[in-house]
Image (tube, helix red, strand yellow):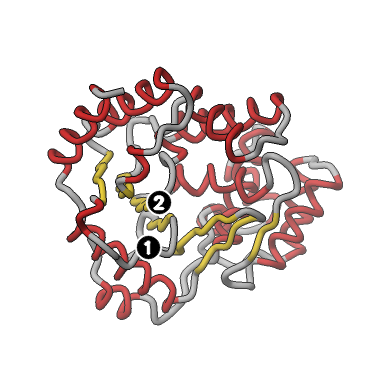
Amino acid sequence: MITAVEVRNMTKRPGPSVRRRQLGAMLRQLRQDSGKTTRDVAEWLDIGDSAVSKIEKARTTIKAQTIRALCQLYDTDASTTDTLLRIAKESNERGWWAAYRDTLPEWARQLVGLEADALHLWNYEAEFIPGLLQTPAYVRALMRANRPDMAEGDIERQVTLRRERQERLGGSQPPCLHFFLNEAVIRRPIGDSAVFREQLAHLVEASKLDHITLRIVPFSAGPHPAISGSFVMMQFPDEDAPAFAFVENLRGAVYQEDPGDIERYTVVVDALDRLSLSSEDTREMLVKTVDVQ
């Protein structure tokens, strides 16, 4: 784990913003969907192949003129072009805010791509199982409890979203996932006993995977620096420090990208690392909890 002191030294210059990462990922997907190669794009824009790579990997600022040219090459519709231009404008704003627009807001869709591109992901959850570890039945029970007004069709879209997130992280080179769960997460049943038992058993199996570290913050740890709420922090390949912390709430989400924010969340993760049960003791607690369901 990177220490707060190391992060302080690494984040003197801000890295690519979340929005720029999203923009690059969307342009890469549009290129692939259109059947174009990076050579095709380079010739169209009259730039080098490496410059195309920098655009798609968020290594450079993307001008509106470039986006319009790419949208012409990829034959995108007006709505997609407008979205890309808006994101490009927002990419200069750090710590941007995204509000809910429907059951699957843009920020949630883009989070899927960010997770898949990450090298390390740290997730502290205070109230429920992390989305990347949820079973379909648990998702349905959680949505019905949290959003009793949600239509069944929208609940199934949530199930689909989580399945997509999980599948994209199941490749040959998945990111390293570090989960810290408040003990309350495994003590408060969500769904009936069969649903909750299945979910806990899934956690036991997930904890055995090489790319997953799962640890419980026990009640005995007392107050701790993460007590204010859940968060996700990500680090990407070829970067020396985490890029942002993601915090979700009832009305949307915020990506905190300032160096001071990153340093603070790194301090929190360091504390969770000290206070949590070991992976082996966590698995033992989970097995015992499954047995009493």
Q: Position of residue 4 (x, y in %)?
A: 27, 74
Whether residues under marks 1 and 2 lie with C-beta atoms below 8 angstroms apart, the answer is yes
Q: Residue furthest top?
A: 194
In screen coordinates, is 65 left or right of 108? right
Counting residues from the N terminus, which is met first, the one under dot 1 or under dot 2?
2
In the image, residue 291 sits, relative to residue 234, either above or below, namely above
Q: Between 107 and 226, which is closer to the camera in this rendering?
A: 226
- Indicate which disc residue 187 carries: none
Q: Which residue is mark 1?
A: 227
At 31% from the left and 31% from the top, the residue drawn is: 203
Badge 2 amino acid? Ala
Q: Position of residue 283 (x, y in %)?
A: 19, 34
Whether residue 124 is visible, yes or no, is yes
In screen coordinates, is 150 left or right of 118? right
Element class at badge 1: loop
Whether residue 164 is visible, yes or no, is no
Badge 1 amino acid? Ile
At 75% from the left and 64% from the top, the residue drawn is: 64
Q: Give me the C-alpha separation between circle 1 and circle 2.
A: 8 Å
Q: Position of residue 214 (x, y in %)?
A: 26, 42
In the image, residue 203 sits, relative to residue 260, either above or below, namely above
